[in-house]
Amino acid sequence: EQATAVVNFAAATATDDSGTVTVTQTSGSASGSAFPIGNTTVSWEAEDLAGNTVSASMTVTVLDNEFPDITAPANIKVSTDPGLTTAV
């Protein structure tokens, strides 16, 4: 199972002298989603009433700082076979 982290962030905002700007997320997972370990780029595009567009991005970095678990088998004691220097 791949480790993930749920990441919450504010939506991008934009302003324009025309007064109306539409902002659309164009890549990456939405806020509140589970992001995988590593870097994920989240991008938005803003468009004003005249059709002018601009984009902006951020990087979400998820780190895995948890050490893995390991279990070794139990210790083993073996005696040599009678009259021999080895055990089979």
Image (cartoon, rainbow, N blue to C red):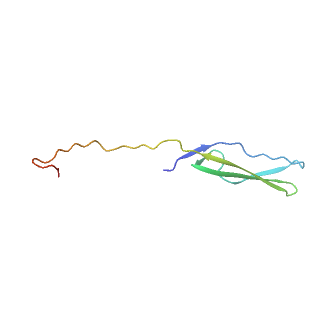
In the rendered image, residue 82, in percent from the top left (x then y), is placed at 10, 47
Using the image as rendered, state which of residue 34 and residue 82 is in the foreground.
Answer: 82
Residue 53, x across and y down, in percent: 82, 56
Q: Is residue 63 left or right of residue 44?
A: left
Q: Please tell me in which quadrant of the rendered image residue 51 appears.
A: bottom right
In the image, what residue occupies the spot 80% across and 54% down? 54
The residue nearer to you, when weighing 28 against 32, is: 28
Write the residue at 66% across / 46% down: 31
Q: In the figure, is residue 83 to the left or right of 6?
A: left
The foreground one among 76 and 56 is 76
Q: x%, y% of residue 17?
A: 90, 48
Query: What's the residue at 59%, 44% (across, down)?
Result: 6
Direction front: furthest residue: 85
Q: Position of residue 8 (x, y in %)?
A: 65, 42
* 59 to the left or right of 55: left
**Tally of numbered tags:** 0
Of the pair 49 and 74, the residue shown nearer to us: 74
Residue at the (73%, 45%) spot, across then down: 11
Left of 10 or right of it: where is 48? Answer: right
